[in-house]
Image (cartoon, helix red, strand yellow):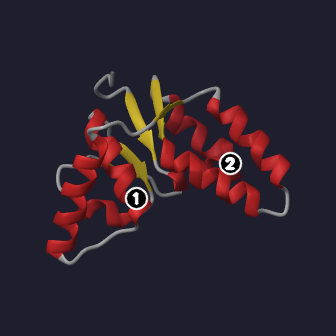
């Protein structure tokens, strides 16, 4: 599925920043041929849209974005990876939000680098984290 160096998985924070300033982020995203979004990140985007003062505007934004990405959902192997990550983080005393464990599990499952601004993903052993500050 993933083409090395040409595929990427996006964390929710990257998509939100792209929505706020697409010109600043388009160049980074354009350098990838395959852009993936974890299903849990999509759920977070929808939750944010419905909580906003302009839900219709944000729902349309999400809809347009979905035309350019592929959503990756969990399957029967994703919970195994989630469990391993969660245990590793607990043992090392570096817990991260549960949704972010699902995002990390998706990245590991599909062998994708994860673009994020959240430093806590660096605690996940084996995860290829691309730190994108804006």
Name the residue furthest front: 76
Task: Classify mark 2: residues with Cα within 10 Å, few (<14), some (14-19) or many (20+).
Answer: some
| Residue 124 appears in the picture as rendered | no
The answer to whether 121 appears left or right of 118 in the picture is left
The answer to whether 53 appears left or right of 80 in the picture is right
The answer to whether 16 appears left or right of 53 in the picture is left
Task: Classify mark 1: residues with Cα within 10 Å, few (<14), some (14-19) or many (20+).
Answer: some
- Which picture quadrant has residue 66? top right
**For this rendering, which residue is in front, 96 or 87?**
87
- Which picture quadrant has residue 117? bottom left
- Which picture quadrant has residue 90? bottom left
Name the residue furthest bottom: 93
Look at the numbered disc 2 and give the secondary structure of its residue: helix
Which residue is at 22% across, 48% downward? 80
Q: Which quarter of the rendering shows the N terminus?
A: top left
76 relative to 126, above or below: above
The answer to whether 119 appears left or right of 134 in the picture is left
Residue at numbered disc 2: 19
Which callout, 1 or 2, points at the residue further toward the start of the chain?
2
15 relative to 125, above or below: above
**For this rendering, which residue is in front, 102 or 66?**
102
Which residue is at 47% across, 50% downward? 11
Which residue is at 55% across, 36% downward? 27
Residue at numbered disc 1: 100
């Amino acid at each position: 599925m993933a083409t090395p160096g040409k595929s990427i998985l996006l964390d929710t924070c990257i998509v939100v920043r792209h929505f706020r300033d697409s010109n600043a982020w388009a160049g980074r995203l354009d350098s990838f041929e395959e852009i993936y979004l974890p299903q849990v990140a999509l759920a977070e985007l929808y939750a944010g849209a419905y909580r906003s003062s302009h839900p219709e505007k944000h729902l349309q934004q999400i809809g347009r974005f979905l035309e350019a990405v592929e959503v990756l959902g969990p399957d029967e192997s994703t919970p195994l990876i989630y469990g391993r990550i969660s245990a590793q983080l607990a043992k090392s005393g570096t817990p991260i939000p549960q949704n972010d464990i699902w995002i990390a599990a998706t990245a590991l499952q599909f062998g994708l680098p994860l673009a994020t601004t959240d430093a806590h993903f660096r605690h996940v052993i084996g995860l290829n984290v691309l730190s994108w500050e804006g």
